[in-house]
Image (tube, rainbow, N blue to C red):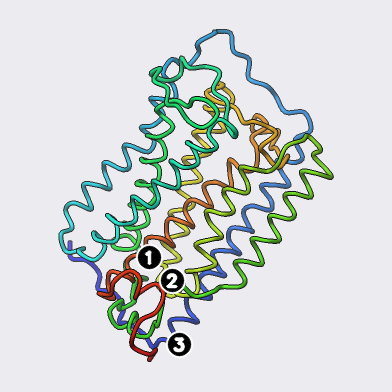
Amino acid sequence: MPQEPRALPRHPEEVSQAQVEAALVVTVLGLMLALPAALTLVSVRHPGILRLDSPDPTPRGYTWSLLLFLMPFAVLGIWFHRRPDLRLQRRAFLRAVPVLTAIGFSLDFFLGSVVLAFDHWDVTIGISVRVVGGYVPLEEFVFYLSGFLTILLTYMWCDEAWLARYNDIDYTAGVARVRRLVRFHSPSLISGAVLWVAAILYKTLVARDGGFPTYFTFLLSASIVPSVGLFHSVRPYINWRGFSLTLVLVLLVSLLWEVTLAVPYHWWSYQRRAMMGLYIGAWSSLPLEAVLVWVAVTYTTVIIYEVIKIWQASGEGAASAFFAKDKPPI
């Protein structure tokens, strides 16, 4: 069937206002769902505990669960391969994947043994990888690679196919109006600082279980740092409807994966000293960070992909595009 034609590019001021409104709608929708969900979960005062009658109830469970990411990646990868017309997107994809993978791998390598505990290696194939302070299963690295690839391809599919009519920006014309990509976005810095201070205060004054909110600090840094430097430039190019659908799908898969399988069946557990101290009792005492990680990962993935796509469309070198173009802004 022929594809529906995309809308024509609009005036820059109209585009900017429309994107601001779209970002606000996504935020309001998220809060509209998160607030009643949080109130309902908090109302569970005496959560039940899954009783395991077998010492090995899910053999190779973690390994098999990776299909939740590998299968969507395979299907979306076939779609992407069959779209040779997406040349700019392909260049951006190939450059975004190493950056995103490095973020996931760094969490495993530097904080894997600090944030997580793996006490039941029978749920894996048994291959361990040496990291700072201990070992993590090989599946952890496969998870981060496949997870980032799936999230990125899902957003690209939404942007170029399912919700393509809302991707109506002419990148070539748009980048001509941008002097440099790295531009300070103060709301990102302020919101990040407020959240970080709030996490530390809660950990110190309310949870009082020792340690430091290491996991939350990493998630905040991985999402806020790109946002502080790049959100101002990348906001007009984000397909916010595509972002929202990607986030919903990712959260659905992650909650199915972690809430109903990984945590109750003890595939891994979280080190309480590295958490901020907010746990969801109805979900086997899942720390709040385990939910926030998917919001942070999706947000960071979209920002990094879109900013690299802008850079590639500009035809400039990286230093020139990100820090100072020779031509003045239009």
Residue on which the image places disc 3: 13
Disc 2, SS: helix
317 sits left or right of 294 in the view: left
- Residues at marks 2 and 1 touching, judged by CB atoms closer than 8 Å: yes
Disc 1, SS: helix
Q: Residue furthest right?
A: 205
Disc 3, SS: helix
Counting from the top left corner in percent of width and height, residue 2 is at: 18, 65
Dot label at residue 306: 1
Q: Measuring 34% from the left and 79% from the top, which residue is drawn there?
A: 175
Residue type for callout 3: Glu
Gap in angstroms between the C-alphas marked 2 and 3 = 15 Å
Q: Measuring 45% from the left and 47% from the top, which residue is drawn there?
A: 103
Please, is residue 229 above or below residue 126 in the view?
below
- Mark positioned earlier in the residue sequence (2 or 3): 3
Please, is residue 70 above or below residue 293 in the view?
above
Residue type for callout 1: Glu
Counting from the top left corner in percent of width and height, residue 146 is at: 36, 40
Residue on which the image places disc 2: 234
Gap in angstroms between the C-alphas marked 2 and 1 = 6 Å
Q: Measuring 64% from the left and 58% from the top, which residue is drawn there?
A: 32
176 sits left or right of 218 in the view: left
- Mark positioned earlier in the residue sequence (2 or 1): 2
- Residues at marks 1 and 3 touching, judged by CB atoms closer than 8 Å: no
